[in-house]
Image (cartoon, grey):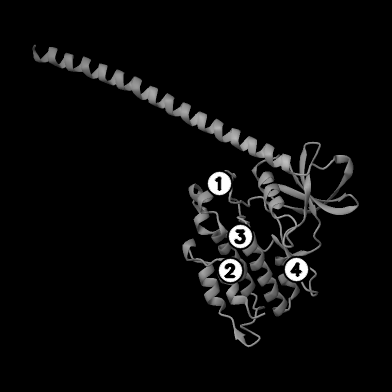
Amino acid sequence: MDPLEQLAHWGNEMNEFVSVHDQSFKHYVYSSDLKVSRTMDNILEVEKQQRIETEQQLEIINPNQIYVSNLCVGAGFFSQVFIGTHNNIEVACKRYEMKGDMFYNETANLKLLNLQQYVPRFYGILQLDVFYYIVMEMVHGITIEHYLNTNPNPFELFSILRKIIKALIHMHSIGVTHADISNSNILVYNVGNSSRIKFVDFGISCNSNPNIKVHYKGKNGYIAPELLDEGKTRKSLNEKTDVYSFSVLLKEILARNILLDNYNGVSIDWSTILSKCSSIDQINRPTFAEILNYFYVV
């Protein structure tokens, strides 16, 4: 076989090799796509079933038994809160335009935490026209952000911080991570008379259910550094992310020079608390049970 014939023979062999492997590659890609498609179908089916089960466990409020006013008392990126009346009780009606992940996250975790003193009481869900509502207790309070502008008593503020910490200890003990702690998502009421607190806005909260869908969209400045990596969000979202957000809130409070360095003769090392809670590595952050040890003096 002369050199030209040999070259042509090699060329034919190469074409056959490429053709066979190209078909194999196409078969592999098709099979992989099919597996991914089936996996996504399975995930969507599981999510659909979970949502059906969630709705079955919730109180569906009869539209004839509730009045929702047009008075909006709060608004966020994805929802608005309106005043309503249900069974002759004033209620807050949080309106979503669709029953998406945030709607289901909030309803599931409010139900899980229902009747706890640190969250609004949950009454049920409601559909009116094209909107979906979460109906809950109306809390007549002010946000921590506004409370700090009232020149609060340092002992009262210290007590409020203790209540926030204790609430989060309990919340985490049953597997719920709030995931959106900020100065606007904690309400203070009965100010000046045994002040109390309630956490609101559980739209991006999560619990120990590994199938719950989370899209993290916390308040800028309060987001833990590990959550900035979008690929790690679900895995990294836990009680330590709440600890970081708490450190930002504490830093804001300390910047106002309201808290004392000494309570009942006991010095408070605020810099150490802040440093530990705001650690870049979440492994090095304390739990809220450990943080509470710094607040035992009052």
Q: The C terminus lies in which quarter of the figure?
A: bottom right
Residue occupied by mark 1: 210
Report the mark closest to the observer, 3 or 4. 3
Amino acid at dot 1 = Pro
Q: CA distance from mark 3 to mark 4?
A: 21 Å
Q: CA distance from mark 3 to mark 2?
A: 10 Å
Helix, strand or loop at mark 2: helix
Residue 106 in the image: above or below residue 34: below
Amino acid at dot 4 = Arg
Across and down, in percent, residue 185 comes to 69, 59
Residue 27 in the image: above or below residue 246: above
Across and down, in percent, residue 230 comes to 51, 48
Across and down, in percent, residue 145 comes to 70, 66
Q: CA distance from mark 4 to mark 1?
A: 32 Å
Helix, strand or loop at mark 3: helix
Residue 20, located in which quarter of the rendered image?
Answer: top left
Q: Which numbered dot is residue 196?
A: 4
Q: CA distance from mark 1 to mark 3?
A: 16 Å
Residue occupied by mark 2: 289
Mark positioned earlier in the residue sequence (1 or 2): 1
Residues at discs 1 and 2 in contact (Cβ within 8 Å)? no
Mark positioned earlier in the residue sequence (1 or 3): 3
Q: Which numbered dot is residue 173?
A: 3
